[in-house]
């Protein structure tokens, strides 16, 4: 089963189409809640398209990870360098549920901005 790091690495891999990368790691019924706001699969796909347009490089450092059956929990730092030279650094705490095929069906996360 793939990890969030695997998913993020594929989502920002320029050799993969966004739709292909999302479908590989997330079910069509996927929902995500970030800091209290829910989005569905289509909104998630659109957000990744937008992020790809501004991102030059994305690095994920996993700090903690736990997986048991369909449940998954993880904490990571994401470092996004923008094409304009800006940088976004966040610590992410997430809990997820996977489908039987191993793809993510639901993610609930909280993010903490870190000053670079």
Image: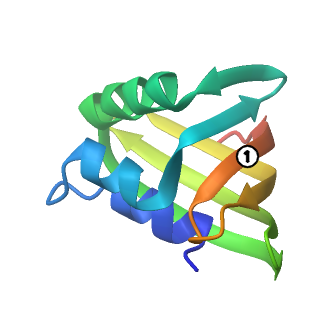
Q: Is residue 32 left or right of residue 50?
A: right
Q: Is residue 21 above or below residue 18?
A: below
Residue drawn at point x = 65 percent, y = 50 percent: 105
In the rendered image, which quarter is residue 112 located in?
top right
**Disc 1 element:** strand
Q: Nearer the viewer, residue 95 or 57?
A: 95
Residue drawn at point x = 39 percent, y = 60 percent: 24
Q: Quadrant of the C terminus?
A: top right
Q: Is residue 109 left or right of residue 62?
A: right
Q: Nearer the viewer, residue 46 or 97?
A: 97
Q: Position of residue 100 (x, y in %)?
A: 65, 69
Q: Position of residue 107 (x, y in %)?
A: 73, 46
Q: Position of residue 69 (x, y in %)?
A: 82, 79
The residue at which mark 1 appears reads as 107
Residue drawn at point x = 49 percent, y = 22 percent: 43
Give the class, few, some or many, for how many residues have Cα within 10 Å of label 1's Cα (few <14, many ≥20): many
In the rendered image, which quarter is residue 86 located in?
top left
Does the image show residue 84?
Answer: no
Q: Is residue 41 above or below residue 100?
A: above
Does the image show residue 3?
Answer: yes
Q: Is residue 59 left or right of residue 101?
A: left
- Count the labels in the image: 1
């Amino acid at each position: 089963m793939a990890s969030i790091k695997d998913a993020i690495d594929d989502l920002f891999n320029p050799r993969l189409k966004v739709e292909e990368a999302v479908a590989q790691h997330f079910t069509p019924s996927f929902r995500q809640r970030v800091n209290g706001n829910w989005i569905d699969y289509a909104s998630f796909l659109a957000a990744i398209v937008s992020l790809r347009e501004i991102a030059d490089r994305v690095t994920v450092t996993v700090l903690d990870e736990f997986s048991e059956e369909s449940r998954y929990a993880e904490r990571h730092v994401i470092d996004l360098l923008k094409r304009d030279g800006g940088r976004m650094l966040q610590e992410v705490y997430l809990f997820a549920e996977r489908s039987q095929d191993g793809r993510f069906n639901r993610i609930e996360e909280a993010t903490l901005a870190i000053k670079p």
